[in-house]
Image (tube, rainbow, N blue to C red):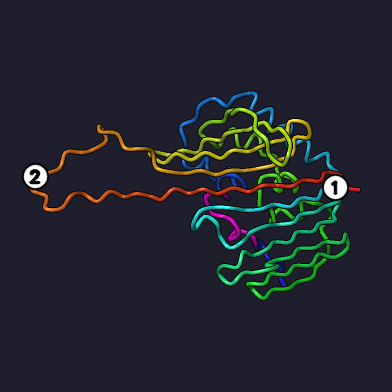
């Protein structure tokens, strides 16, 4: 069967894919930028270097969100060993017809197998020569890095601003927290990446997007001839996150 080119894009909200996995797309909006904090840029660069230096990794990712942001999937299990051994299981959360194992992508170094429950899809093909052959499976920023993408320059040029928040705990380790500002107009959107201070691996990602509070000066005077008050368009807040339990270079 023909190779499935982008099987996982429906797993997480489009906004999150745009912000984290497909950051060059954001720059097409022409966001007004503020200078990126050099310390935040350094954290991203060291994170990318850490993933490139890993020979193997095991990671369990748990997704959470509010309302529609939750999507259909609850968790993913990733394992890889360079140059080209790769395994990814994606688990459904019981909604929209998904439960249990929703997708499996397995490469033993010789053959690459794909299974998708929702599409009733199964394929077998020759294994790619290295991990760059799995770019189409990148669910998260760190998976994009593992499969050959360098995020630091793209993020610096694509987001409105980048800074460091106060350090915080995630997955039992102290993390530097990089805040990426993707706000547009009255919509305030911030993505935060929690990067381990010692091993520089991503432990958590949060995505928060909501309309800015209205100020009195934002209200337009009502026309006395209007029978009905003007309709105010309100976009619900979006909250989404994932947490990683990481085992680098497992024995």
| Residue drawn at (62%, 43%) of the image | 205
| Residue drawn at (35%, 37%) of the image | 213
Element marked by disc 1: strand
Residue stretch in magenta? 8-16
Query: Does 9 appear in magenta?
Result: yes
> How far is disc 1 from disc 2 in space, using C-alphas?
69 Å
Expressed as whole percent of the image width and height from the top left, the position of residue 169 reads: 67, 35
Image mark for residue 56: 1
Q: Image height check: is 35 above or below 61?
A: above
Image mark for residue 224: 2
Reading the chain from its start, which is encountered first: label 1 or label 2?
A: 1
| Label 2: few (<14), some (14–19) or many (≥20) C-alpha neighbours in 10 Å | few
Pick the residue in front: 35 or 190: 190
Expressed as whole percent of the image width and height from the top left, the position of residue 251 reads: 91, 48
Looking at the image, the residue that sits furthest to the left is 225
Pick the residue in front: 94 or 17: 94
Query: Does 144 appear in magenta?
Result: no
Looking at the image, the residue that sits furthest to the bottom is 120
| Residue drawn at (66%, 53%) of the image | 62
State whether the magenta stretch is mostly helix, strand or loop. helix
| Residue drawn at (74%, 56%) of the image | 77
Element marked by disc 2: loop
């Amino acid at each position: 069967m023909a190779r499935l080119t982008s099987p996982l894009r429906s797993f997480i909200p489009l906004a999150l894919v745009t912000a984290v996995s497909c950051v060059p797309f954001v720059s097409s909006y022409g966001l007004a930028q503020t200078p990126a904090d050099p310390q935040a840029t350094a954290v991203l660069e060291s994170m990318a270097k850490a993933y490139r230096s890993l020979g193997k990794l095991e990671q369990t990712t748990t997704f959470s969100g509010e309302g529609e942001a939750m999507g259909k999937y609850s968790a993913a299990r990733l394992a890889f060993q360079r140059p080209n051994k790769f395994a990814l299981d994606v688990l459904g959360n019981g909604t929209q017809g998904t439960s249990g194992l929703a997708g499996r992508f397995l490469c033993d170094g010789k053959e690459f197998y794909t299974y998708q429950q929702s599409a009733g899809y199964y394929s077998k093909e020759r294994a790619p020569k290295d991990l760059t052959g799995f770019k189409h499976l990148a669910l998260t920023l760190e998976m994009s890095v593992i499969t050959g993408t360098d995020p630091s320059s793209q993020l610096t040029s694509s987001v409105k601003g980048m800074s460091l928040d106060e350090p915080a705990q995630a997955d039992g380790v102290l993390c530097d927290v990089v805040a990426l500002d993707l706000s547009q107009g009255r919509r305030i959107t911030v993505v935060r990446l929690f990067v381990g201070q010692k091993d520089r691996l991503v432990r958590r990602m949060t995505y928060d997007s909501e309309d800015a509070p209205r100020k009195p000066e934002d209200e337009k005077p009502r026309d006395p001839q209007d029978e009905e008050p003007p309709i105010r368009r309100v976009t619900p807040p979006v909250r989404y996150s994932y947490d990683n339990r990481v085992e680098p270079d497992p024995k």
